[in-house]
Amino acid sequence: MRKDKKFAIILPIILLCSIFLGSFSVSAAFTPNFTIHSEAVYMVNADTDIEIVSKNADKRLYPASTTKIMTCLVALENIKDFNAYVYTPYTAFNEFNVDNPNFYGVSNAAIEPLQTNVTYRDLLYSLMVCSACESANILAYNVGGESIENFVRMMNDKAKEIGCTNTNFTNPHGLFDENNYTTAYDLYLITKYAIDKYPRFMEICDTYSYEMPKNSANPDGYSIYQTNPMVSPSSPYYYEGAHAIKTGSLDKYYYKKLDGTFDYENVDYGSRALVTTAEREGFHYILVTLNAPYCNPDGTPTDTILSFTDHINLYDWAFNEFEYTLVINKNEQIMQIDVEKGKDADTVGLVVTEDYWTLLPKSLNATTIQKICETDEEVLVAPVEKGAEMGTLKLLLNGELLTDMTLVTESAVELDMTEFYKEKVSGIFDTWQFKTIVALVGVLIVLCIVTSYIRKTHKKRVSEMNRRRKITMLPQNKGRGKSKKRNIRR
């Protein structure tokens, strides 16, 4: 077998798929055993990047004000001085008027047009703490080179750079637009990027209240407050260990007609979106939900805000259900591979170079993880060094790759010199040189035999000829005299 040809050796595959059956289709390995109201969910363990729950994670839905996560991200990347004052033009406020049905769902920070004492810092905090829509537009205007449209292009370019494939932004605030959409998975990518790249992002999101600069309506200044009650100890939705990133809500979906006016007859019920993180006892999760019902099917308000209910239930389930489990020990022999010409050994064990821990349900035995070994060689030839790389171990759960690890030899195997020389000697007989020599020797032997035979035959013939010649050359009288004497005697 050629060295570059790989083969797979599959170790015992025991997947208890029935453990994970649920009421909806998921691509993740785990499924909670309770109702999730949000249409799309994506939950990841941030410590291991393991997908915990995925429900309609790639379905395009309306993000509402969670759009502001990207607005904040692009602003953080481009602002040089956070204490610099910004220009607050009427352009940033014009769309929020009574002629636009979204006017009734606009959250704001009470910033006034042409207010001169507003900084980038004020805008970032009001954007993420109280979800101010005018702050989103003011940021977009100033960061986008006095163009909100240019800033939106920057948002979409950043989304593509991050890896989002089902996202399109049409505004920086998230008010309803048919073409302003994303997915739970894409929104997770955007959020994780912001958390990983900019520590200031979480500082802003975790703020419960913020003091805004004074203006004509608030001459003494005023406070804005967090829209996510999960971080408020006095709220029924308070959750210990939760971090507020961004809420989003759309009261109703008003669709535009071809002439630019709104269709007030064909209106869809609104929805809620929510992005949070939570930490508890060393476990850290990021959770995105989209399109939780804003109201009951009959249009009446729900008794609870279902997006918060989903997050609380999912966090409770994750923190109670999962634990870190040692799946592979670095001293554990994964498999054996045959060795030829080894001294006192005809196999060698393969192991991994480090322990592998992962997050698993407490009820799940680690042996249910599928182990697939891919080695570069089917048979090794001594000598074999200890720690030599021999291939890869892949660990899969419910068909999804958890990790891959390098397989190395567990010990060294010395060369058996007796076998080595025996093979060398036996190998000589298989060479073309040896076969050629044997053939030549055979020919020489045949030639010698033939030559010897010819010589003997020739010698015999010569001897016979000489004998005959001698007989022929005897004197005639000698012969007659003897004859006479014999006749007289008779």
Image: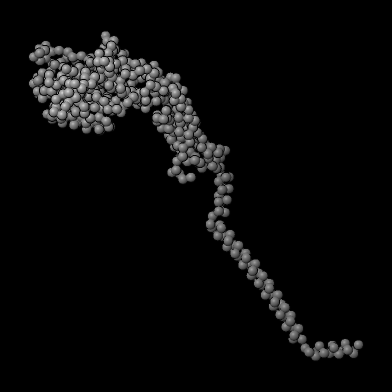
| Residue closest to the eye, 357 or 166 | 166
- The residue sitting at the front extreme is 265
Task: Return the x and y of residue 438 as percentages of the image width and height.
Answer: 58, 59
| Residue closest to the eye, 22 or 287 | 22
Scheme by which the image is coloured:
one colour
Point 48% across, 27% down: residue: 14
Task: Return the x and y of residue 288 as percentages of the image width and height.
Answer: 29, 22
The quadrant of the image that shows the C terminus is: bottom right
Task: Return the x and y of residue 63 as percentages of the image width and height.
Answer: 24, 24
Residue 279 visible within the image: no
Q: In this view, does 56 lie above or below 348?
A: above
- The residue sitting at the right extreme is 490
- The residue sitting at the top extreme is 234
Point 82% across, 90% down: residue: 480
Task: Return the x and y of residue 406 as percentages of the image width and height.
Answer: 42, 34
Point 51% across, 42% down: residue: 381
Residue 406 visible within the image: yes
Point 88% across, 87% down: residue: 486
Q: Is 108 placed left or right of 356 in the picture?
A: left
Q: Is 384 placed left or right of 167 in the picture?
A: right
Q: In this view, does 153 lie above or below 431?
A: above
Residue 277: name its quadrant: top left
Count of numbered marks: 0
Residue 214: name its quadrant: top left
